[in-house]
Image (cartoon, rainbow, N blue to C red):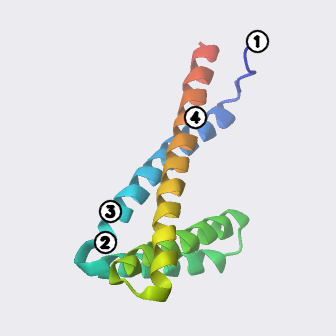
Amino acid sequence: MYDIEPTDSKELSNRGFKGISATVGGVALLVLKGIAGLLGGIVGVGIGVIAMGIGVSGLKSGTRADKTGGAVALGAGALLALTGIARWHIPIISGLASFSTGLVTLGAVGLIGYGLWNVFKFVRGLRNRA
């Protein structure tokens, strides 16, 4: 009937943290996608390069969680840079860059959905504990 909800406080707090951080990350990605087109796409390329640099530094780390975060940042940075390049209307790259804009939107909506689901499960777990 009902899902078995975690009653362990560590598991419950992890679910709450994942929910909030994924939701905020999704909203931030949508905002960055909107900013990426400013100044003819130069801002998007700059944001993308910064995110790729953060991603590369995360990939060099020793822990698995940092490597996963680094890979995500590297991918998001590449997509944001391509989103900025889409404003330049270069014939060969423009199609790929427009596709990357859709991928950024899809990723942001996915993050928001994942985050809201975890927040919902967190609240449900809190109610079951009471």
Any mark on residue 34, and which?
Answer: 3
What is the spatial separation of the Cα atoms under label 4 and label 3, in whole angstroms?
25 Å
Any mark on residue 116, and which?
Answer: none
User: N-terminal of the two: label 1 or label 2?
Assistant: 1
Specify the amino acid type for callout 1.
Met
Query: Is residue 16 shown above or below 58?
Result: above
Specify the amino acid type for callout 2.
Gly
Residue at 70% in and 24% down: 7
Specify the amino acid type for callout 4.
Trp
**Mark 2, other Cα within 10 Å: few <14 / some 14–19 / many ≥20:** many
**98 and 21: which is toward the camera:** 98
User: N-terminal of the two: label 4 or label 1?
Assistant: 1
**Mark 3, other Cα within 10 Å: few <14 / some 14–19 / many ≥20:** some
What is the spatial separation of the Cα atoms under label 2 and label 3, in whole angstroms?
6 Å
Q: Quadrant of residue 37?
A: bottom left
Residue at 43% in and 59% down: 29
Decide if residue 65 is on the left or right side of residue 124.
Answer: right
Specify the amino acid type for callout 3.
Gly
Residue at 49% in and 45% down: 112
Query: Mark 1 or 3, which is nearer the eye?
Result: 3
* Residue marked by disc 4: 117
What is the spatial separation of the Cα atoms under label 4 and label 1, in whole angstroms?
18 Å
Decide if residue 73 is on the left or right side of residue 66.
Answer: left
Say if residue 51 shows up in the picture. Answer: no
* Residue marked by disc 1: 1
What is the spatial separation of the Cα atoms under label 1 and label 3, in whole angstroms?
43 Å
Any mark on residue 37, and which?
Answer: 2
Q: Are marks 2 and 3 in contact (CB under 8 Å)?
A: yes
User: N-terminal of the two: label 1 or label 3?
Assistant: 1
